[in-house]
Image (cartoon, rainbow, N blue to C red):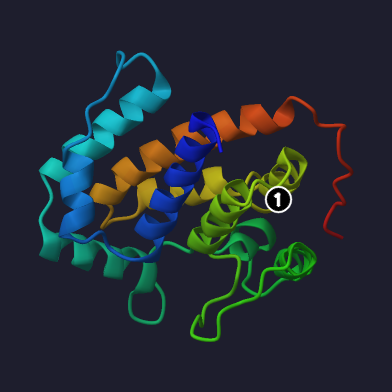
Amino acid sequence: MNEQQQIRQEIYGLLAHLYRVAPDQNVIDWLSGIEVEGDDSHEMSKAWSVISDAAKNSEQEALEDEYQNLFIGVGRGEVMPFGSWHMAGALMEKPLVALRQDLMQLGFERAEEVKEPEDHISALCEVMAMLIESGDAEVLQQRFFNRHIQPWFVSLCDQITQAEHANFYKSVVSLTLAFFSVEQTRFAKNPNEIEITEVQ
């Protein structure tokens, strides 16, 4: 794996972790220590600066409360981190069926201890990280991203930004938007290379 692919894998892994659980002190310390190369005119550099500054000013208990309010809540959180909800307006809809079919074709199986649907943003980031790590052809990464992340990541980020309790996670949105925009451009370069079946 070359350096660029490793960086992509690590960013997907970081986003998967941040959307799965509130960051612990080790993650906060790592984010706080990021040294940004280049200037803030570059969207990715700006995003790293934003999330690093947010980490430096964060407190563990507040982070856990924020995550709870945003993604769990009582009944449901302020934010719905599931693709089906953003693409079809409800959970467990046709986009999830299409995702499960694609995951089966790729050889991914849902872990028994995982209770939430597979279209949780953290699970999708984990799949992308594994596709990159395993050296799977870029065409597979392109197909997965374009079908299961690209259609709804902006809607998710908007929902987080507008959430009453969003604080640190606004910085996570900055990184998400910057990175996924780069990926979107990357995977739009050869749009006719693969056949993308629309969800009916």
* Vertical relation: 22 (above or below) 195: below
Of 136 and 90, the residue lying toward us: 136
Horizontal arrangement in the rendering, residue 194 relative to residue 121 (left or right): right
Horizontal arrangement in the rendering, residue 131 relative to residue 170 (left or right): right
Q: Residue furthest bottom?
A: 112
Q: Amino acid at mark 1?
A: Phe
Residue 200, horizontal then vertical, whole percent: 87, 60
Quarter residue 50 falls in:
top left
Circle 1 — which element? helix
Q: Residue at x 23, y 53 (%)?
A: 27
Q: Residue at x 89, y 44 (%)?
A: 195
Residue 197, horizontal then vertical, whole percent: 87, 51
* Vertical relation: 105 (above or below) 162: below
* Vertical relation: 71 (above or below) 188: below
Q: Residue at x 86, y 40 (%)?
A: 194
Q: Residue at x 18, y 56 (%)?
A: 26
Residue 186, horizontal then vertical, whole percent: 65, 28
To which residue does mark 1 refer? Answer: 144
* Vertical relation: 73 (above or below) 53: below
Residue 176, horizontal then vertical, whole percent: 44, 41
